Image (tube, rainbow, N blue to C red):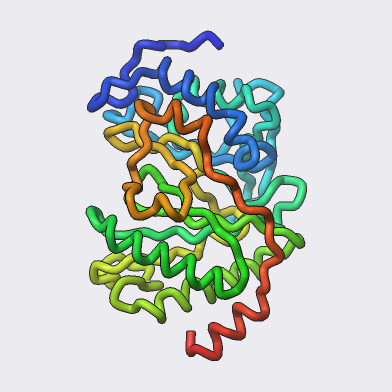
Amino acid sequence: MKVSNADRVMFPEVGVTKGQVVSYYENAAGLMADFVVGRPLTLQRFPKGIAEKGFMQKNVAEHYPASIERYEVPKNEGGTTTYPVVRDVNDIAYLANQGTITFHVWLSTVEQPLKPDYLVLDLDPPEGSAEIVRAVALETRTVLDSFGVESIPVATGSKGFHVWIPLAGKPDFEQVSKASQALAGIVALKIPDLATLEFLKKERKGRVFVDWLRNHPGSTVAAPFSLRPRPRASLAMPITWDELGSTAPDAWTIGNVEDRLSDLPRWPKPVVLPIDHIVKTAEAAGV
């Protein structure tokens, strides 16, 4: 596609231009389809590059092409938000040409907005705590394995890791939210010196926040393969559990990702989440 201001530097520290950003998204669009297509999007845009202030865009711009659907959602305080919804993966590059750096996505589709097809636990550490967040990620895997739930870690391109679980059986958000809170609570109970459910940073005391709050209607998470507004042009990358110990959360960048895109880990098959078993186990443990 024709890129406007292709030479504009979007990531000054590494000299990555807008043309390179759009080219990356053209190459990655097919891989992003399962996480982006058919879902309401919140676009994190930096039209002048990350050295300038960016913004989060929920409402679709009037000039966006008709191929980008409009999805209207009532707001609690009145009025509506009209989200952009991509159907054609080519529109991912179009949105990158509009200055989008990160695609934040719902965990459900517009066809079934109250039935998520993913559960995500966001492991949010203090800056510079890679070893701690790895330990929490491994404990999260151990807890999930104990319930027969296969998962995959994603290096977020920022400070931490996301743990993704594809869901079968069409549970609703109320059920998935209960299960995610219970799972996070079990992890924090097992390793209380490393993990916490404390939302306020001042109460975390150097521990990793096991954030289960993504699992609510309308909440978003950075899509796998999305760039992040970080100095090195890092991005969210699925990894294997075996790679976790040697992979920094921001290991993958626009500069080193090309070969990786053709050699990706296997994504787990969707699983019917044993919600009652998880919740009852957490309750019995005192979570």
| Residue 199 appears left or right of 97 | left
Expressed as whole percent of the image width and height from the top left, the position of residue 257 reads 41, 30
Expressed as whole percent of the image width and height from the top left, the position of residue 115 reads 71, 58
Viewer-closest of 265 and 76: 265
Residue 133 position by quadrant: bottom left
Viewer-closest of 35 and 214: 35
Q: Residue at image x 47%, y 20%?
A: 22
| Residue 239 appears left or right of 269 | left
**On screen, 145 above or below 287?**
above
**On screen, 100 above or below 163?**
above
**On screen, 273 above or below 104?**
below
Q: Quadrant of the N terminus?
A: top right
Expressed as whole percent of the image width and height from the top left, the position of residue 96 reads 49, 25
Q: Residue at image x 35%, y 26%?
A: 255
Residue 259 position by quadrant: top left
The extreme top residue here reads 2
Viewer-closest of 20 and 221: 20
| Residue 209 appears left or right of 67 | left
Q: Residue at image x 40%, y 60%?
A: 123
| Residue 143 appears left or right of 73 | left
